[in-house]
Image (cartoon, grey):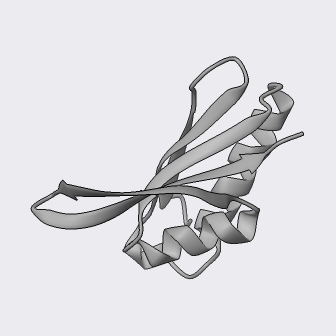
Amino acid sequence: MNDSIVGSVFVVKESDEIAKLRLLYVEPSARGLDIGSRLVQECIKFARQRGYKTMTVWTNDILSSARQIYEQAGFSLVLEEKHFSFGHDLVGQNWEINLI
């Protein structure tokens, strides 16, 4: 945005059939502009082009904006697990989308 990087995301290989979306981040100044959604859509497109059958993402339930992006992109919640991280009791969530 205006020649500045305002967001990033990774797609990593979990297996020959499963791609994993990792580390979605959008700068605070660019939030609310659908950049996160566009990044996730590009990841889905990339994974489909590479022949992956499924894409997964792990997040925490308190990250409501990220969860909303994943849900709107077609991901479904498949697992929740309580954990203690960053000095807090949290609920980790695994989300998944079928790419075929």
Percent from the top left, x then y, of residue 100?
Answer: 90, 39
The part of the image, by quadrant, that contains residue 40 is: bottom right
The part of the image, by quadrant, that contains residue 60 is: bottom left
Rendered view: 40 above or below 89: above
Residue ID at (80%, 32%) = 53
Count of all numbered marks drawn on residues in the image: 0
Rendered view: 29 above or below 85: below
Residue 4 in the figure: left or right of residue 40: left
Residue ID at (68%, 60%) = 76
Q: In the orientation shown, which residue stands out farthest toward the right?
A: 100
| Res 5 visible | no
| Res 15 visible | yes
Residue ID at (69%, 59%) = 75
Q: Quadrant of the N terminus?
A: bottom right
Percent from the top left, x then y, of residue 2?
Answer: 55, 66
Rendered view: 52 above or below 61: above
Q: In the orientation shown, which residue stands out farthest toward the left?
A: 87
Residue 45 in the figure: left or right of residue 22: right
The part of the image, by quadrant, that contains residue 95 is: bottom right
Percent from the top left, x then y, of residue 81?
Answer: 38, 56
